[in-house]
Amino acid sequence: MKPPLTRVCKKCGEEKPLEEFVKCSKRKYSRTHNCKVCDRIHKTKWRNDNIERCRELRRQYRKDNPEKFSAEFYKQYRKDNPGKNKAASAKYRKDNPEKKRLAWEKYHKDNPEMMMRLSAKAFLSRKIGIPTAELPEELIQYKILQYKLHRKIKEHETS
C-alpha cells in the first residue's frame, strides 16, 4: 500500500504534507498523528511543567555519558563541524557585544603574560612580514623582554 501524500493532524485538525509530521518507525507510514508544530508545542509545555524532572534527566545523562561531555569530544565536534561553531560564535558576538567586550577585558587583565605574547607576535608579524606561526621563539621572547623592561621603566618613573 502506497503512503498518502498528506495527513490530518489529530491536535490542530489541519491537513498537511506527510513531511510535516514527526518520524516514528512504529507508526503507520512511519509518521506520528501529530504535526511537528503541535508536537513542539506539546514538548515545550511538558518541559515547562516539569523543569526539575528535565534537569534531573540531563544530570543523569551527563553522568551516564561522560565521554560526550569531555573536552576531546567538543574539540572533535568543532573540528568536524567548523561552519556550525563559527556561525554560532559570530551570531553570539553580534548579539552580545558588551558581554564579549567585558569578557575580553577580564581575560586581558587575568592573563597579562599571554596578552604580552600575543602583542609581541602581532607586532613582529606586522613589522617583519612573517606569519605568526613561523616566527622564531627567540625573537618572540626578546620582544616580550622589551615589553617587560618598558613596563618596569614606566613604573619606576611614576613612583
Image: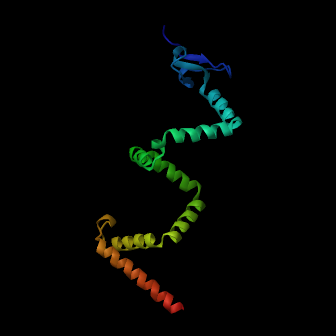
Residue 140 lies, in percent from the top left, at 34, 74
Task: Give the side of residue 139 with respect to residue 61, left or right.
Answer: left
- The residue at the point 49 percent across, 39 percent down is 65
Residue 83 lies, in percent from the top left, at 43, 46
Residue 141 lies, in percent from the top left, at 34, 75
Q: Nearer the viewer, residue 147 or 14?
A: 147
Relative to 71, residue 2 above or below: above
Relative to 73, residue 118 above or below: below
* Picture mark count: 0
- The residue at the point 55 percent across, 63 percent down is 103
Q: Quadrant of residue 97?
A: bottom right
- The quadrant of the picture occupied by the C terminus is bottom right
Q: Quadrant of residue 138?
A: bottom left
User: Given the current orientation, which residue lies at the most extreme top position?
Assistant: 1
- The residue at the point 58 percent across, 54 percent down is 95
Residue 56 lies, in percent from the top left, at 62, 39
Relative to 148, residue 134 above or below: above
Task: Give the side of residue 26 with respect to residue 13, left or right.
Answer: left
Asked which colour scheme the image uses, the reply is rainbow
Relative to 19, residue 99 above or below: below
